[in-house]
Amino acid sequence: MAARFLARRLAIVVSLSRHRIAHTKSYPTTSYRGIKPAATPMIARKMTSPADSRAGADTTTAVVGVEEENEEVGQGEGVRSEVGEGGGDGGEGVSGEEDKYQYLQRGFTSEIFKIEIQNIPKYIGYGELKKKLEKLGLKPVKIKKPQRFQHQPHCFVTFRCEEDREFALEALKGVVWKNKTITAKVAAPSVDPLYRQRNKRKTAADSGAEGAAKRARIDQEQSQLSLRQRLDKVVTPLLGTAYESQLATKAAQMRLALQKAAYLIQKEGSNPGGEFARQVDLHRGMMCELEPILASPLQTGYRNKVELTVGTQPDNTPVVGFRLGSYEDGEFTVVSPEHCAHIPERVKQLGQAFQEFFATSPLAPYRASDESGYWRQVAVRCYTTGESMAVVMIHPQSLSQEELGQEKGRLVDFFTTGPGSANPPNSLYLHPFSRKTKDHTVDMEHLLGEKNVHEEVLGMKFRISPDAFFQTNTPATELLYRQVRDLCRHGNRSSESSPSLSSDVASSRPAIYDICCGTGTIGLYLSKVLCARRCVGVEMNQQAVEDARANAQLNGIEDVEFVCGRAEDVLQGQLEEEEESGGPGEVIGVVDPPRAGLHPRVVQCIRRNPHIQKLIYVSCNPEGHQTLGNFVDLCRRPSLRVKGTPFTPVVAVPVDLFPHTPHCELVVLFQRTTTASTHTQSSAPPPGDESLVTESSAPPPGDKDSSAPPPPGDKDSSATPPPGDESSAPPPPPGDKDSSAPPPPGDESSTPPPGDESSAPPPPPGDKD
């Protein structure tokens, strides 16, 4: 087998050496032809020296080496990104004859060496496709999951250089996969979204379409607002609404999310049974009971982490604040956050200090429109302990190590002996990077003060590193953790009056599995208050795992273990150890995933292990498509794909962590189903095969209407859609086409140029920052 593979690869190499593959269409990538796989591309781009970059001197074309992006093949599920797109100024972006492929000349993007693979077998997932490409000896940089468009499933794959791309085109010729002969061709790069948006507006204006009038009206409304008012509408859109009304609106959103979940569980979950249908009827179409929303103890100045963009004002002086729009909208204006209600004074002070420093720096702020400039972003953390941390992000461009070292020295001097010495951050880092990567802490350099800061939550102290996730509203986080604790106490949620453990929980000493544990805050807190016999935390970020281990020692908590890795890979082994130990007491799972939700394999792993009888799901995006999918997979009847006894949702508690924004945290308690009549314990029969339905899966005698009636016009559906929702899947929020929740206000993310799929947008306020 190995000999045949090597012979095939050698034949392909020989074939490539004899001729070049003729491309049917030429795209602006000719400057990259012939680049060796291991070579660093040398890209011609316009650069300015640090001295004349702010003075507006004429730019000259220089050949600079662009460091290859440290990017791995993979989807990166569950990855918590700390890096924002950053940057921005008041420039015009693409000037003159706008080039819709101009972004290709700025450096490596996933659009440069892209191919399209067609005729892929149906129902092929990402993992299977990745293995197939690797088996053929290909070296993909990024794979876009196959899309099932009509009868021609296809996907896009990008490579590091043209030689790798041409090798792939040759290697894929004539490959038969599951009786399908797949084909591959060079894929056209996507049009720059900034160009597309501007061209769309221009076309509408030229044609006199109704959209042009609407756009003109919006522009007029925007022009009548001050910059401060525009910023408030972006970062705190509910600021002008009474807080009681905000809570009522969020409670209604959570109610709708639970109704959508109930509908999908009945629709997609193969009709989980009459008991669940009665539960839905009891709770007015929701999948479980919804308790009253809990208000944030602090409504102003509550954000302990803020990511500020570095831009320029109309007079060309630097400004540190929030960007008013996205790259696609062509909005690069940055406004100071000095008036923002959700930002604490300490953050505003540090932002102003950095703005003074950038005003004296010979390096200009970064321009997202053409990727010129240097200073991109300042991430500031401030906690109730009085400790603060700042991470300054810089695009090194063509700076030498000596020039970069000079700026580091100037930055340190500013906060030690200069104007910033009166109130410096307790910890200061510099983060040079040109493009976002998964391992985005690789170049982070500690410059000043302590390496970590600390925060106190419910009498416990936690260490926080520069890239660690920590909830952005500490007082509300304490409220959230109390709710998680109370849901662990067998439904006894009256915690404030009786903080001691109930006798049954105390005697059983449950084991806690904290999935997506971050710095271990939830797991360590539960381990302490529930006297857990064992606590296991699983997290992908190695630095966060180290913080969690340090936090366990800091709080004197033993019998805890934190493991770095994908939850779907680590969890099964840990649960098998739990099964072998056979210890007394229950096993409680706690999941606090990123906005994207849990990976389906994690849900399946939880379902398959019978020891986890209780699961607490903490969601920052309960209306998201992936989160709702998690709820469905937890509750659906067993099948060949989803095995194990399902869970039943018991109660949900909304907690407002983000006042003045439309976003809310939701805590849901799931318990393993024990009633035989509720779910079948064996695999569900194939659709339409009623003869295989067991007695345990049938509705109780006399309960002919136990299953939910189908929605109007849908005779094949067994679910009743929530009020106002006739679709089989939750509709995306307005303007959001990927069915995920919209980025929260204050998010400094911007739409990156197409092809930079490696970039992950920065975390929204209150999200997995």
Image (cartoon, grey):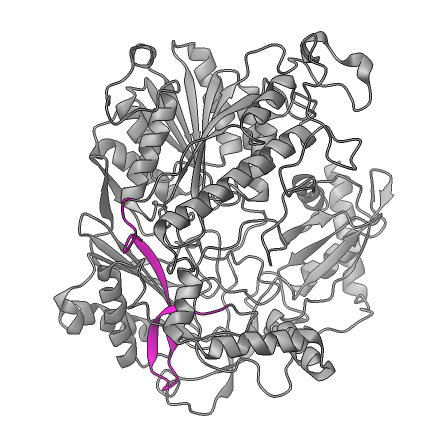
Give left or right: position of 311 versus 27.
Answer: left
Residue 370 visible in image: no
Q: Name the residue located 62 percent from the left edge and 15 percent from the top edge.
A: 678
* Residue 359 coordinates in the image, percent (x, y): 28, 80
Position of residue 484 measured from the top left corner of the image (x, y, whole percent): 37, 30
Toward the bottom, the furthest residue is 58
Residue sitting at x 42%, y 22%: 588
Quarter holding the N terminus is top right
Nearest to the observer: residue 513 or residue 348: 348
Q: Position of residue 292 (x, y in %)?
A: 40, 35
Residue closer to the observer: 146 or 180: 146
Give the percent coordinates (x, y) of residue 374: 40, 74
Give the total of numbered labels: 0
Instruction: Decide whether residue 285 is among the magenta residues.
Output: no
Quarter of image, res 639: top right
Residue drawn at x 69%, y 22% is 707
Q: Is residue 468 visible?
A: yes
Please tell me which residue lies in front, 409 or 585: 585
Figure quadrant of residue 682: top right
Q: Where are the magenta residues, as a range?
A: 297-325
